Image (spheres, rainbow, N blue to C red):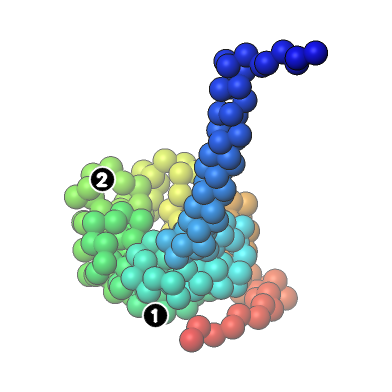
Amino acid sequence: MISPRPSPFLECRSARKGPRLSVAVLLALVTLLGSAACSQSPEVKKEKALERGERYLKENKINEAIIEIRIALQIDPEFAPALRALGEAYAEKSWNFDAWRELTRAQRISPDSLPIGIALGNVLLELGEWNEAENQAAQIEAQDPHSPHAMTIRAGVLLGRGKLDEALAIVRAVPVGSLPEAARIQADVLLRAGKLDEAEATYQSVLAVKPGNVKALVGLGAISLKRRRFDEAKPPSRTTPEPP
């Protein structure tokens, strides 16, 4: 008995099925290999390290943030966002000269960056460089005329020059709760003016948003000294490794 021969259509379809599956598998492998290669690229590595560093900064884990940001800068020493983040981390530790160095490098690379200008302006206030801080405020206002950051930097300059009433007028014009730094400068003004209760409440509002803020803690310590509460004025012990 002769076996029935398969239809030519089925033979053709069966012959094509194998190669199609092989091509699909090959494409999947190429895609996986491409993804793996991309995930190991220097560009991706530095972005991921910066992302982790900025997350640690927001969580007030400054040492961890510095480690991750330095990893990004080892890959690309001219990575301006990482230089800015490192400057901000140093500023949180009150390493103001180191913060100024990194932020100045960042601004040379990216002169029109508002985040860099804002961070540098705040550090210049801490260094007492009133004219340079004022210049940064002017550059920020050139891009954002109603910037609360520029207003805060200008208030800090006025405070540094001893113009308390003018400084207070500016920081009180900043929308409530928009910037912890504006509230901190307002508290500094109130402290200098001898309004201890108002200053204390304002420093506490800063700490509610940014727990562990060094400048707010220093302000509260100064209030305790003025009230002769010496135990409260003692700063909290913390280990802070020196920058390289």
Structural distance between the alpha carbons of marks 1 and 2: 27 Å
Can you say whether 137 is above or below 129 in the image?
above
Which residue is label 1 attached to? 97
- Residue 223: assigned label: none
Instruction: Return the x and y of residue 151 as percentages of the image width and height.
Output: 32, 51
Instruction: Return the x and y of residue 243 as percentages of the image width and height.
Output: 50, 83
Please tell me in which quadrant of the rendered image residue 234 appears: bottom right
Q: Residue at x 46, y 44 (%)?
A: 178
Which residue is label 2 attached to? 144
Q: Residue at x 32, y 68 (%)?
A: 106
Q: Amino acid at mark 2?
A: Asp
Using the rendered image of the protein, determine whether residue 37 is visible from the camera's viewpoint: yes
Instruction: Return the x and y of residue 123 as percentages of the image width and height.
Output: 38, 69
Q: Amino acid at mark 1?
A: Phe
Disc 1, SS: helix
Can you say whether 170 is above or below 123 in the image?
above
Please tell me in which quadrant of the rendered image residue 207 appears: bottom right
Using the rendered image of the protein, determine whether residue 218 is visible from the camera's viewpoint: no
Disc 2, SS: loop
Instruction: Return the x and y of residue 125 as percentages of the image width and height.
Output: 35, 69
